[in-house]
Structures are given as structure tokens and as C-alpha cells.
Image (tube, rainbow, N blue to C red):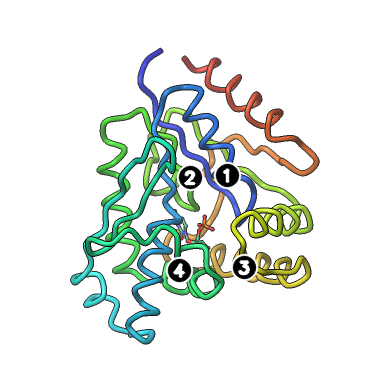
Amino acid sequence: MKRINIALDGPAAAGKSTIAKLIAAKLSMIYVDTGAMYRAITYKYLQKQKTEDFNQLIDTSELSLTYDETKGQRVILDNQDVTDYLRENNVTSNVSYVASKEPVRTFAVKKQKELAAQKGIVMDGRDIGTVVLPDADLKVYMIASVEERAIRRQKDNEERGIESNVEQLKQEIADRDHYDMNREISPLKKADDAVTIDTTGKSIEEVTEEILSLVSDIS
Ligand code: DC
């Protein structure tokens, strides 16, 4: 199979990362979770008492992704592995704001483009098909009802030992979608040439198969 890049975009908790990991494993590709980069910068922003100087925040940040055989993608920020902190509620509730800032996006998008230059990447996020990889070989836009996304996120949180409740998650997901879709720079939207997959009521296996069949159509 020729080396390809796959862009997977969509709103919060639509199942992108679960599916992207499976696709990457099946096709021997590398999965890049771009949300984790924005989360890492948000983690630092919180450590800096919510500084508004985003240029300085970025200029003093060293961010890289590494890959662990068992744990998958790890995020290294200023020589520290911060991956385990990135799903904490405080990070989640501030990440859309931080990700809307120009210095933050320029920094993250540059790194993402570099990572994808070698091809063989499955990348998920909000602006992958529109901004980061406009030439991706396959673009998928994944959606699901807010209700189902909240229930999935609740399960996810339970497994990670993070406390949450479905009603609150529904509200948070809806708020985050609104913020991500309405920000000025690279808002979340479907690329014109992306295939939309509504995962509501579908199993992980079904969605994975659907995408794998799209991949075989292009290769
Ligand atoms: O996929 P996630 O929930 O980890 O993403 C966290 C936030 O980061 C999301 O609310 C918006 C932002 N994000 C973004 O702006 N662009 C991306 N490519 C990925 C995430």
C-alpha cells in the first residue's frame, strides 16, 4: 500500500481518537492526537496562573510527542511527560479558549505539519482536513449526537478514574463545540472533500470497517 495521510476531524468526544488508534494499528500507521498538544499548552497556561501573554507562553515551551509501545502517544512538555494530566477537568474546561489563540495555533500547526511530512499518519483534531493537511489522501468528518458523546465520555472518564456526570458532560461538550466552531482562527468545520460519518448508534468496529473500506477505495 502506498504511504498515505488520513485526517479525522469532528466535534468533542465523537470517538475520533478511539477510531484513529484502531485504524493506525490496522494499517501500521502512526496516530497523532493533536488535541493533546493544545491540552499540554493549556496545562502550562494553568500553571502560569492563566497568563494572557500567549506569545511568551509559546516562546518558552518545548513540546514534543513520543511513542511508547504500550502506552501510545506521550506528550513531553519542557522535558516532563505531562500526558497523564491532560484529561483533567481543569484542562478540559480551558482548552478551547487556549486553542483559539493565534500563537498557540501557529505553534501547534507547524509541529503537526512536520510530523505528517513523512506520511503514514492518522491525525485527529478540528482543523486537520481544512488547515493542517489540506492534501490528506482521505478526510473523514466524524459526528455523533451530544447525548451519545456525553455517555461515551462518561465511560472514558470512569476508566481513567475521573469523576463526572452525564448532564454536566452534555453541557460541556455542547459549549466546547460552540466555541470550537465559532472561533476566528481555523474553526471546526467539515472540509469540502471530507466524508461525513455519523457514529451515533454505531459500534467502534462498524465505524472502523467503514473507514478501512474508504482507505481501500483510494489505495
Ligand atoms: O480532541 P480534544 O478533545 O482533545 O481537543 C481539545 C481541544 O483542543 C478542543 O476543544 C479544541 C482544540 N483543538 C483544536 O483547536 N484543534 C485541533 N486540531 C485539536 C484540538
Q: Amino acid at mark 1?
A: Lys
Vertical side of 114 occupied by 38: above or below: below
Q: Which residue is mark 3?
A: 178
Q: Give percent across and percent down for residue 173.
A: 66, 65
Q: Is residue 111 toward the left or the right of residue 122 in the image?
A: left
Residue at 26% over, 58% down: 63
Q: Quick one: 207 or 164, which is closer to the camera?
A: 164
Q: Which residue is mark 2?
A: 124
Vertical side of 12 occupied by 61: above or below: below
Residue at 42% over, 23% down: 28
Tag in front: 1 or 4: 1
Q: Which residue is mark 1?
A: 16
Residue at 64% over, 38% down: 196
Q: Amino acid at mark 4?
A: Glu
* N-terminal-most mark, 1 or 2: 1
Q: Give percent across and percent down for residue 73.
A: 39, 45
- Helix, strand or loop at mark 4: loop
